Amino acid sequence: MATVVTTDYSIATNGDIRYTGTTTNNTVIEFHRWLGDLMDDALAAGNDLLDITDATASERSTDNIITLKAPFNIDDTLAQHLFDGSIIQNGGDEIYEGILVFAAAGMYLEIVQNGALATNFWTTGLNADAANGISHRFMLKVRTAGADIDGRRLIGQTREFGFTYSEFKINGTARGNNVLALTYATDLNNQTAAGTVAGWTTITNTEGYRSIDVDGNATPENYYSEWNVDRKYEVADSPWFCFNNLWLKRGTFPRHHARN
């Protein structure tokens, strides 16, 4: 178990626990035990104003579920430096949930939360455990001001051109670690260079409800999108639609009229 570097954290008299370090990360159980060690101190010292005279700072349900007791609290910045579990605070009105990702090393991870990409501080790997196939471990806020964020639903996805696109849904996080399992491998069906596809600038997509007579029977059918392309792409690059769609969807959300 890693040792908490005391100088990486500060504790104010009002209960605010903040991160003052640079790169050190700790598990939630390490954080909890460090707070307990401070409470054994006879007298508070430095910028950690917590000692034996203070109320209990945190309680352990399991090694992966820690509750901070009022008035003690963390902020979003400190939460980025804790992993392997959940932190519950403010009487349950605010929850940071543990995220555990099984994927190949080097995968650029995106998290969709409440219809938008969450602020990405984990990129291609964070607190990885390559020996066990784990690429990322971190916490993400799922409840704030007494309300769940979009029912605590999350989508993990990878969208790197030239590699397989995959996604994994969490339909409501639970306390502890929540698993995302993603495929990340070279896309053997797409060997077209990114620069080539990026040059296909005359392919257009009109989004929205569209009436198109696709089969030429003088009776339009209804679609959610209308694509048009120069004839030269149909001849020279027969899979243009697939590859261009992959290019447009790289690292993006929402996808074109996706139905989740």
Image (cartoon, rainbow, N blue to C red):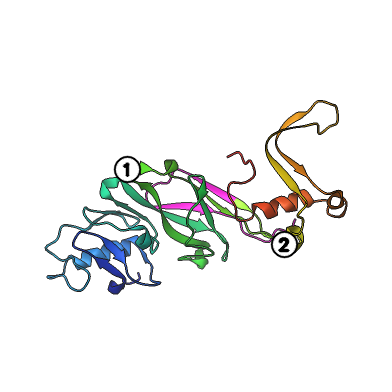
Could you say whether the residue bearing mark 2 is in a helix, strand or loop? helix
Could you say whether the residue bearing mark 1 is in a helix, strand or loop? loop
Residue shown at 22% from the left, 53% from the top? 69
Counting from the top left corner in percent of width and height, residue 106 is at 57, 66
Eyeballing the image, is 260 above or below 187? above
Q: Amino acid at mark 2?
A: Ala
Tell me: 164 left or right of 154: right
Eyeballing the image, is 227 above or below 186? above
Residue shown at 65% from the left, 60% from the top? 185
Counting from the top left corner in percent of width and height, residue 26 is at 36, 66
Crowdedness near tag 2: few (<14), some (14–19) or many (≥20) residues, C-alpha within 10 Å = some
Crowdedness near tag 1: few (<14), some (14–19) or many (≥20) residues, C-alpha within 10 Å = few
**Picture quadrant of residue 236:** bottom right
**Picture quadrant of residue 99:** bottom left
Foreground residue among 32 and 76:
76
Residue 146, which numbered label? 1
Residue shown at 83% from the left, 52% from the top? 233
Instruction: Name the quarter where the N terminus is drawn.
Output: bottom left
Magenta region includes residue 173: yes
Tell me: 249 left or right of 217: left
Tell me: 93 left or right of 13: right
Q: Amino acid at mark 1?
A: Gly
User: As drawn, which residue projects farthest toward the top?
Assistant: 219
Q: Kindly report the distance in space between the C-alpha atoms of the residues bearing marks 1 and 2.
A: 45 Å
Task: Report the residue marked by disc 2.
Answer: 194
Q: What segment is highlighted magenta in the picture?
A: 167-190
Tell me: 115 left or right of 31: right
Residues at circles 1 and 2 in contact by the CB criterion of under 8 Å: no
Counting from the top left corner in percent of width and height, residue 39 is at 18, 65
